[in-house]
Image (tube, grey):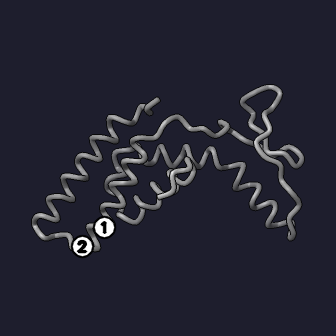
Amino acid sequence: MKTKQTPRLLKALENLTAFVEDAVRTGVLNADEMKDNQLLVEANVAIADTQKAQHTPGPWELIGRHIVARTKTPYQKVAEVEEVSPLGVEIANTNLIVAAPEMLRALKMLHSIEEFKHFGHEEQVVVLNAINKAEGKQS
């Protein structure tokens, strides 16, 4: 199942591809820049081709030592937190895991806005790589 953003993403990909081809043709991009832009195009293709997330939908929360999804009753167990020393590291890791579904949603929302194409190259790559990593598509 394609996401609602797929047509817009494919159009953005077409525009980006045309821009890169024109930049190479006119000599604006050198080989290293071309490689960086090719990675960006590949990351955009992976996002455009993404299907519905396979992870347990959020929001998640911590109950005792269990990270659970609040989308069902009874709550669905997502993970169990083991004791880690020092305790501060355990709490920080748990908070990061619990926030993961909302962070992925925020990154996808950021990627879908018109202004995203005006972000710097490095920022775009970071966002796209994080989305791909969260969806199991390493780039």
Mark 1 Cα-neighbour bin, 10 Å: few <14, some 14–19, many ≥20:
few
Q: Is residue 19 above or below residue 49?
A: below
Residue at image position (81%, 62%) is 90
Report the label total: 2
Residue at image position (39%, 36%) is 5
Residue 67 spot, x, y in % from top left: 79, 45
Q: Distance between the Cα atoms at labels 1 and 2?
A: 6 Å
Name the residue tied to disc 1: 35
Name the residue tied to disc 2: 31
Element carrying mark 2 = helix
Q: Quadrant of residue 38?
A: bottom left
Q: Nearer the viewer, residue 114 or 79?
A: 79
Q: Nearer the viewer, residue 72 or 135?
A: 135
Residue at image position (80%, 32%) is 75
Mark 2 Cα-neighbour bin, 10 Å: few <14, some 14–19, many ≥20:
few
Q: Are marks 1 and 2 in contact (CB under 8 Å)?
A: yes
Q: Is residue 88 above or below residue 12?
A: below
